[in-house]
Amino acid sequence: MTRLLTSPPSPLPSTESSSGGDTTKIPLPPSTPLKSEESPPENSTLDKGAIFPWVSSTTPLPRLGLNDDLSGLSNTFRSRFAKRVSVALEMGVPIWNILITKAWEKELAKNCEWAFKMAVCGLLSRTFQVNFNTLYTDKMLHLNTIDSTSSESSIDDEPMTEDDNQVLSEYVEAMIEESLLRLYPKLPSLPTTESPFLVCFQLKPIASRLENAFLVPSLTRDDIKSIPKLKGSYSKIENEWQTSQSMNALREMAEELHENTDHGGSKRSLIVDVSVDCLEMFQVRDRDTGDVVQGYGVGEGGFEKGDTIREEAVTHLVRFEVETTKGENPGERIVGSWQIIDIDDMLNGNVWH
């Protein structure tokens, strides 16, 4: 199997430093392989028996209509605008871009759209043990082992080797947060003709837009992993302010938070929600019985191999997160490598702050 990519890309390669310099590519963080025995997170909203966890709904998530970014902060127009501005400034976006052209929002959404497509490609390859490079083109993903007559269904029938899986694991684990990745099973590496499942999956992103963006000061996901008692600290500070309006109480809570982290509160987190409109087909069948076990046609009966699977227009809500650190120059912030932390609220936003 050909290596996935000579140098696996960062999910969002077009991030900038706050010094306003040229756009630079952020290197991928080192990955820690997940243990195969780890079970899916308890806060998952999906059926844990899903072959390939996926939400293929033509109806947008309800929280979009409520402008709920799951930040724990107010979601008034003024508050949402202030949160978005704080994220842009942290990324080093010039003020004229933030207030006038807003081009940074379109660029960020477009990069997120690309990252979503490539991450899903990695998940498909990992779950169904299919060669990564046979699954994607510039415009779409396509895997079809249901219709053997499809001109786009030819795939590498050689089982993936341990080296193949190692390269794939490093790629996927760099792009997808481990709690989300644990939702996806890894099927045995078998020739396609021996796989117990037949699958048709097509994903063609056609548009994207930034829905929500907010900054979590002084706290990161890694802090929570190292010191579990810090989980929810940001929300507790916000709730205290709403209740007491006491600056002294807030100052004490912030100082305690800084003392409990190994960086003294110098690191921050950025979280964004991006909607990705797609043309999509998705169906999984049992090879022996031909029954639809997931996706289009579940429970409807009457589907025969080779039947047309309907293409639908769907919108996915993809949640991204990145850590920022102090730069060498005064006021400079360095943006790290973005990760996908949730898709369609399968982990209820994967909230930790």
Image (tube, grey):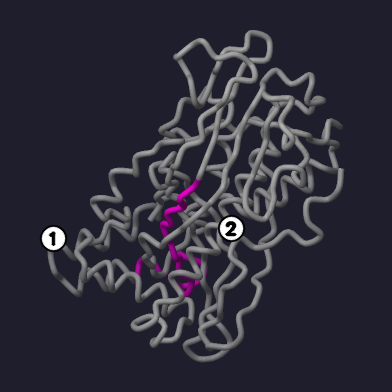
- The answer to whether 321 appears left or right of 28 in the picture is left
On whether residue 257 falls in the magenta region, the answer is yes
Task: Find numbered disc 2 in the image and state the secondary structure of the residue it sits on.
Answer: helix
Give above or below for 36 relative to 298: below
Which residue lies at the image location 39% right of the left edge and 86% below the top edge? 95
Give above or below for 286 relative to 222: above
Q: Which residue is mark 2?
A: 114
**Residue in front for this viewpoint, 288 or 223:** 288
Give above or below for 332 relative to 290: below
Task: Say few, some or many: other residues with alpha carbon within 10 Å of mark 1 (under 14 / 14 to 19 / 20 or more).
Answer: few
Q: Which residue is mark 1?
A: 243
Give above or below for 204 relative to 236: above
Q: Quadrant of the N terminus?
A: top right
**Disc number for residue 177:** none
Q: Quadrant of the C terminus?
A: bottom left
Residue 255 horizontal/vertical position (percent): 34, 71
Which residue lies at the image location 57% right of the left edge and 12% below the top edge? 291
On whether residue 50 falls in the magenta region, the answer is no
Q: Which amino acid, mark 1?
A: Thr
Q: Which residues are magenta?
A: 255-278
Which numbered disc flags the more N-terminal residue, 1 or 2?
A: 2
Residue sitting farthest toward the top: 289
Residue 187 horizontal/vertical position (percent): 70, 27
